[in-house]
Amino acid sequence: MLATAQLIGFAATTRPQLAKRFYGDTLGLRLIEESDFAIVFDANGTMLRIQKVGELVPAQHTSLGWRVVDIRSTVGELIKRGVRFERYQGLQQDDRGIWRTPSSAEVAWFKDPDGNTLSLTQWPSRSA
């Protein structure tokens, strides 16, 4: 039933102006609209609604992620834009914070201004 419906992504912020700059300027997403309720971006054809909330307890897991073609290049560009990549105990991450999964996908995590965990993933070319 929903296989042909368009997905909408959601995140939340208690600091809308910081979120607007982060998702728009830092991550490069195109701003669609802003209202009293949300900041809306175009994430490569997927609507991403950053909901304005009074309180927020960030999830302890990844809430949004992007599939990228060249994770090293993308991580490098985001570092230049001030993004700090997370390091997790027990994962063997390289000097930029990239972890190679058992299936050879590569993943790096970072946080938005509200502490929501976001990720980048590059899958091996054979499964792309």
Image (spheres, helix red, strand yellow):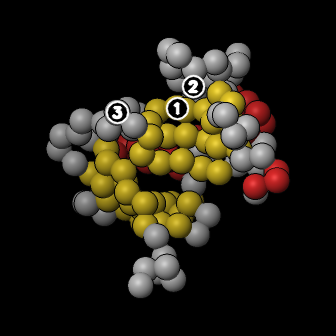
Q: In 3D space, how far apart are the residues under numbered discs 3 and 1 (Cα atoms)?
A: 12 Å
Q: In 3D space, how far apart are the residues under numbered discs 2 and 1 (Cα atoms)?
A: 5 Å
Between marks 2 and 3 in the image, the one whose residue lies nearer the viewer = 3
* Residue 68 visible from this viewpoint: yes
Q: Does label 2 or label 3 sit earlier along the sequence?
A: 3
* Residue 74 visible from this viewpoint: no
Q: How far from the left and from the top, in percent, is residue 24?
A: 53, 49
Amino acid type indicated by mark 1: Phe
Q: Residue furthest right?
A: 126
Label 1 Cα neighbours within 10 Å, binned few <14 / some 14-19 / many ≥20: many
Q: Is residue 56 left or right of residue 111?
A: left
Residue beneath the point at 61% across and 64% down = 44
Residue beneath the point at 58% across and 69% down = 45
Q: Is residue 71 left or right of residue 83?
A: right
Q: How far from the left and from the top, in percent, is residue 76?
A: 73, 30
Between marks 3 and 1 in the image, the one whose residue lies nearer the viewer = 3
Q: Quadrant of the C terminus?
A: bottom right
Q: In 3D space, how far apart are the residues under numbered discs 2 and 3 (Cα atoms)?
A: 16 Å
Residue beneath the point at 55% across and 40% down = 119
Please tell me whether mark 3 sits on a helix, a strand or a loop.
Answer: loop
Q: Which residue is mark 2?
A: 85
Which disc, if any, is residue 110?
A: 1
Front one among 39 and 110: 110
Label 2 Cα neighbours within 10 Å, binned few <14 / some 14-19 / many ≥20: some
Amino acid type indicated by mark 3: Gln
Q: Which residue is mark 3?
A: 60
